[in-house]
Structures are given as structure tokens and as C-alpha cells.
Amino acid sequence: MRYKHVFAIPAYGQSPWLETCIRSLKAQSQPSPVILCTSSPSEFLEQMAEKYELPLYVRRGESSIRDDWNYAYEMADGEYVTIAHQDDVYHKEYAAELLKAAGKWPDMTVFTTDYVITKGGKTITGDRLLWVKRILRLPLRCPAFNGFTWVKRLPLMLGNSICCPATTYHKSLLGEPLVRSEYSYALDWDNLVQLAERPGRFICREKPLMYYRVHDGAATKACMEDNRRAKEEREMFARFWPEPVVRFLMRGYASAYKEYELSLIHI
């Protein structure tokens, strides 16, 4: 690998937040290369690449989250790869914290951090959902145990408590492709469950090093509208729990969907 760590951004359309994302990655206290990847090339993306002197890689074929993420991962010539989402912002210490963990635990296959939500110009640091996810990630903070499969699976049994854009993958250990899931929405959750079965350590730095943007154009909303999210999440819960527990968990998730939709109205 040419670099220790690379940020790879799968870019779509003309996101009004892409430039903010790029600037946050270029401002890292410990610099890492940044690349842009897309399956929907445009003059806008060419301008962004030129302005910030970034390589722009174009994948031929129909856009899909799995294929676009895998392409970005493939194009990143780094031992560690962060699939940076174009709408989000990264704390200036993200790369430094990642590389510190990589030096301490060379068998680390997945690195993730805490995050906060940005919505309508406001930053949410501690709503109920964020605190629940922080509790679920507690097992990953125990180095004596976070290399065991059952420990890596614990944060994934009640939903995906690991924020996808806050996550980095050890490419030199995991190989290619990164994502093998057939899902449209729950592919990040499914992928982490698959990675948990493989040798290696999941490390969580429980410090908010990423700002996750909630907005009306998010893929989450589109998947909810055609019921893909509910169907796929039910199937994921069924891997861990008997049907009565799955029904109970899905009732809780239905309530969460409604809260998410209401939150978009007030953005």
C-alpha cells in the first residue's frame, strides 16, 4: 500500500455539503490523502476535484451504494480506508486517533468513533438514540475482549450502533471487496456482522469525531418510503433473535421511524 490511511469519498449529484466535507478532511491535524469517486460524473465534481487538487475516479455502470462503496475502497491505495460520506464533517483529530489506535492494535480490522448529529444548523450531542448506541458500543472499549467474535457482535444485536461514515477499515487485512451484502439499506449493518465473524479486533474511540448530517435528501428517508428499511432490518434481527423478540424490536423501530420523519419536518 502506498499510504497508511486514505479518505475515499463516494460522491453523488451536487451535494451542497460536499465541499464542507472535503475541507474537514483536508484540515486533519495528521494529514491523509483524500480521493473522490463517483458513478455519476459531472462538471460540479470535476470542479471540486480541481479546486482541492483531488484525484477523481469514475466508475462505469449503474449507481448503487454497495458498488460505489466498493469502488471507492478499491481505488484508495491505503492500508486503512475511511469511506467518508459527502454530507458529513470530520473532526480534525479523526485521522490522528485512527492512526494512534492502528499503532497500538495492529490486528484492528474496524475502527469507529462516537459521533454527533447536525440537523437544520443545530448540533445534537446527546439525544436518547445517541446514548443508547453509546451503551451498546461499550464492549468494543475493552481491549481484552474486543477481538472475540461474540463481543464484536454484541453492539449489532439490537440494531447497528456503529455509525458507518465514522468507520475505517483495515484494507491490508480485510482485502477486497469490502461490502458483500445484497441489502440496499442495511448493508452497512450486514457487512459489520460479516466482518465480526472474521479474525481481527473492532476498536471504538468513544469520542465524537464525526458530525452526521440529517436532511430530507438522505438515503435513509428514501429507503423508509418504500419499506426497504423495515424489511431488511427485520431479517437482520432474525439472525440474532426468535420471532417474538423480532416483533417486539420492530415495534420499537417503527416508533423510531416516525420520530425521524417528524424531525425532517422541522429542519
Image (cartoon, grey):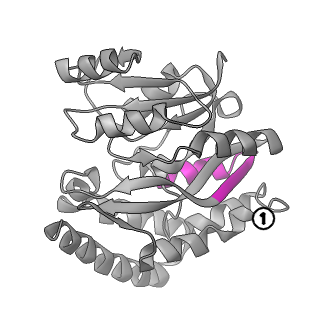
Q: Quadrant of the N terminus?
A: top right
The reply to whether the magenta stretch includes residue 202 is yes
Q: Is residue 66 left or right of residue 139?
A: left
Residue located beneath label 1 in the image: 142
Residue at position x 42%, y 85% in the image: 248
- Please say whether residue 261 is visible from this viewpoint: yes
Q: Residue at x 26, y 76 (%)?
A: 259
Q: Name the residue type under label 1.
A: Cys
- What stretch of residues is rendered in magenta? 189-205
> Residue shown at 53%/65% (left/top)?
239
Outermost residue toward the left in this view: 265
Residue 171, given in percent of the width and then of the height, sits at 64, 31
Nearer to the camera, 36 or 71 = 36
Is 241 colored magenta in this rendering? no
Secondary structure found at label 1: loop
Nearer to the camera, 39 or 153: 39
Spot the residue most to the right.
144
Q: Say left or right for 62 vs 66.
A: left
